[in-house]
Image: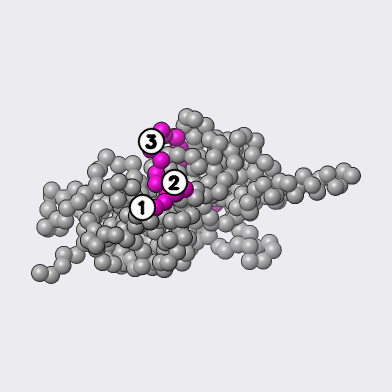
Amino acid sequence: MLVGLLVALLLHFFSAFPVSALSNFSSDEGGLNNEELVESKPFEGGLQEVSPPVGTEKIRERLGRYHPQLSLLSPSQEEILLKGINEKWELVFNLSDWPLAEDAELGLGPHLVVQVDDDHPIRIASSVGQRIVIPMDGLNPGTHRIGAYLAFPWGEALKEPGTSIQSRISFFKKTEGTQPDLDQPWLTVVSPSTLTFKEPLLIDTLIWNAPLQGLKEGDDRWRLNIIINGDSFLMDRQEAIWVKGLDSGTNVVQFQLLDTFGELIDPIFNNQLRLFNSSDAEDPIWLDSILSPNDLFKLLGENDESKVTSLSKDQSGFENQFTLPKEKDDPSIAKYELLFPLQPK
């Protein structure tokens, strides 16, 4: 009878939690042994994983018709730029088969996210053609990393091949050990971000150079440990999840990339904190379970014959820019203004 009771309890637990939440445990400073990696326990607090909002699934299905490809044209991988800290430089991308849009009423649509080192993400919401040129402020001498990815309106990163890019560049000289190696796993926190201010909360990351797992038994080489207000769980694959049951005030979300023994993989880059504060602001359109065809057209930019260039920058004091400069070096141009090649007359 005791064995039967234990089996019933295990079946009940695993039916209640998706495969993404591999394990739950109380956070501590030590590593995890093999038993802790495979043993699962329910959340001790009120936190729980829930299904994605209905609106996001409808938008995801609509965007499923696209097959985007993103590439970084300049600077090239490992390029050394002879630019001072007060000199601007440019990121040049090529993007095909992915809409970029932002509606004045409905908000941000599908977009491109660019992040240098741990600076605030730059969200690019519109384009003319496939070539995107972004003027950037000068950086300190040394080596820097660049991450770029395509995102849904709610900020979730696409995970398909060709939808994200990582690169390294240096100013004047390479500095070894200050950035992850080109083949070394490192973490980008996608959400929480300034796009997430309502429950359910999107938890999403990109793990660059993470080996594929689950192809055969015993091939696991990494775990993502997520700690929310002291309640923690492990994930063994790159996928977004939605959670609810957070505190009414400030919520602390920590991301740790671990090896199979529970030790941090290069803590400098793979141990990050984010804060989430619930807001009484109006619900974003993608939380709405009833999306009209017109709302979908507007949110995805499908009804715009001509698009206005715009750029949104996370957690910054800069407002969106809506003008194309006449000259690239014009000092009146706001930094992070999005540029496109001028069309010949």
- N-terminal label among 1 and 2: 2
Residue 241 included in the magenta stretch of the image: no
Residue 284 included in the magenta stretch of the image: yes
Mark 2: amino acid: Asp
Secondary element at image label 2 = loop
Mark 3: amino acid: Ala
Residue plotted at (19% across, 48% down): 334
Look at the image and tell me in which quarter the N terminus lies. top right
Residue plotted at (49% across, 36% down): 252
Number of other residues with Cα within 10 Å of mark 3, as a class: few under 14, some 14 to 19, many 20 or more: few
Colour convention:
one colour
Measured along the vertical axis of the image, is residue 264 above or below residue 66?
A: above
Q: How far is mark 1 from mark 2, CA to CA?
A: 11 Å
Q: Position of residue 218 (x, y in %)?
A: 68, 61
Q: Which residue is mark 1?
A: 295
Work out which residue is located at the far top of the displayed protein and give it.
249
- N-terminal label among 1 and 3: 3
Number of other residues with Cα within 10 Å of mark 1, as a class: few under 14, some 14 to 19, many 20 or more: some
